[in-house]
Amino acid sequence: MSESVSQAVATPSSARPPLPSLLKVGWSRAAIETKTFFRERDSLIFNFSFPIILLVLFGSIFSGELANGITMSQLYTAGLIGAGLMSTSFQNLAISIAVEREEGGLKRLIATPMPRTAYFVGKVLSVLLVTVLEIALLLAVGVLLYDLRLPASVADWFTFAWVLVLGLTASALLGIAASSLPRSAKSAAAVITMPFVMLQFISGVYIPFTQLPGWLIDIASVFPLKWMCQGFRSVFLGDAGVGLELTGSYELGRVALILAAWAVGGLLLCLLTFRWKSRRDG
Amino acid sequence: MTQSAVKVSGLTKRYGEVTAVDGLDLDIRQGEVFGILGPNGAGKSTTVEILEGYRRRDAGEVSVLGVDPERADRTWRSRIGVVLQTGADTPELTVREFVRHMAGYYPRPRDPDEVIEKVGLTEKANVRVRKLSGGQRRRVDVALGIIGRPELLFLDEPTTGFDPEARRRFWDLIGSLAHDGTTIVLTSHYLDEVEALADRLAVIAAGRVVAEGSPSTLGGRASAKATVGWLEDGVRRSVETDEPTRTVLELARRFSGEVPELTVVRPTLEDVYLSLIQTP
């Protein structure tokens, strides 16, 4: 009994079985995160249906043609892909981590030998899967109801892929960082949703930039959502829609630069501000 | 030779103006069940959280399994188990999924189904954590605390919300873990629980250890005066004595046989505990 313990203590760490790798634990975190997401029926329905309902709603209300055969609903599809991406990553993570922190889930985790990075790997992988599904649904609705043309060229799909990956990375990291803002789990949804909805209104998701005052556009240009939507418009509206852009160009170089800057900034914010314990725990 | 599992000397922790832990010393041997008692706000939780690596200290030396918890790495964490006071997380996983998942964090975990059986949740293994009662959730917490086969297990108020039968089962579980050589640090408000489980215990008040010993000797309990009580001429009488046997023999002679309503009472752990924490 006590012999086996003193033996275990005396055994050098090299003789113990190795700790599970970051990859293995990260993957297993991704699996339970995804399972949990799909089992929380309320948030599943909200997360998935919200952008789709908005698309159908806006597509039905504003049915006009803008220019060169581009319809309002096509514009909305591109914008709502950006907003949907940000809701499944930024909004979802910021709220769910705030709740987990308050419920003591994070505190439990840091007492275990789980590599802390595995927690974030799990979150990002699961968000990636959920976001891809969300975008696929939006595209299906866009194609079926609103004559959205899927990009034909490899170059367009490539643009789609990098806007998605950069935008998702930036939004997910910002969501993780923003999870420390709400003071309690109860206030999390309100604290996170309000600025996010405002951002959608000024980032050209619902209202074209041509109808926004300059100072609102300036504010929106600081944040990543405007640039994600712009990137997605370049993919789905193509040359026919370029005339609708304020600068007459999709500015893909700038899109890449700003999204990458937000990804780096988001990472720094996470590293500097992430709290594993709730405020109550000090 | 018995080594220390936990060694603490001069531990101090302040929160602003308030000194929560004030030069506390502790020595917990390997393989023992050690109880920590103390009123709320005495510095008990702060001390345990420092041992678990959750909090940093302001002064003093702390060694847990030979490692300073402030410099803890994954290997050290794989050797300890922590059962916290609250755990309302992960409601949508089933008990088995949750326990299996956490097993994957450790280099040589226990068998998940065996652990679920040990805490008496086999029938609930496929039920989501959300649907469990408070006491059943607590047992999930305990299962997660022992899944990694810890050498040292921290239990903070482990049986809150248990029904009496579940509590007894839990005591048996702790007994079998201790039998396997696990060192257990137990904080509890239930004095009967500490009395039943702990080999030794410490009482913490105002950030210091005010008494330390086995449950039967704590605070001079074994040598304390006993109270012998009986009924005489319709009046309840009692006497405090160092020699209760002699008193009873004398009474037996006086009543020439059965002494009416005879009682011999030693101070309970609760009596000792309450007198200890009242001393400033």
Image (tube, helix red, strand yellow):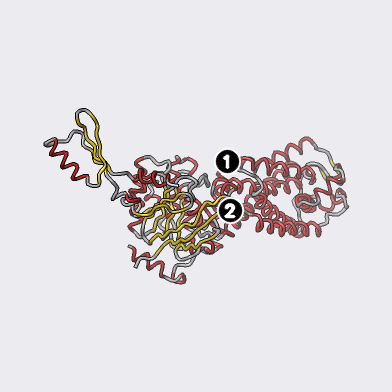
Q: Quadrant of the N terminus of chain A?
A: bottom left
Q: Please identify, in this view, whether the residue under mark 2 or under mark 1 is nearer the observer.
A: 2
Q: Is residue A220 left or right of residue A5?
A: right
The residue sitting at 60% across, 51% down in the picture is B16
Q: Is residue B257 left or right of residue B70?
A: left
Q: Which mark is residue A170?
A: none
Q: Chain of mark 1?
A: A
Foreground residue among A115 and A78: A115
Q: How many marks?
A: 2
Q: Chain of mark 2?
A: A
Foreground residue among B222 and B232: B232
The residue sitting at 14% across, 39% down in the picture is B252
> Is A189 rendered above or below residue B213?
above
The residue sitting at 54% across, 62% down in the picture is B70
Check disc 1 and report its element: helix, strand or loop: helix
The answer to which of marks 2 and 1 sits earlier in the sequence is 1
Q: Position of residue A99 (x, y in %)?
A: 59, 45
> Is B160 rendered above or below residue B199?
above
Q: Position of residue B103 (x, y in %)?
A: 46, 57
The answer to whether one can see residue A161 in this image is: no
Q: Which mark is residue A41?
A: 1
Determine crowd level at label 2: few under 14, some 14-19, many 20+ residues with C-alpha closer than 10 A.
many
Q: Position of residue B41 (x, y in %)?
A: 50, 46
Foreground residue among B69 and B243: B243
Marks 2 and 1, how far apart at CA: 26 Å
Determine crowd level at label 1: few under 14, some 14-19, many 20+ residues with C-alpha closer than 10 A.
few
Which residue is denoted by mark 2 in the rendering?
Answer: A276
| Amino acid carrying mark 1 in the image | Arg
Check disc 2 and report its element: helix, strand or loop: loop
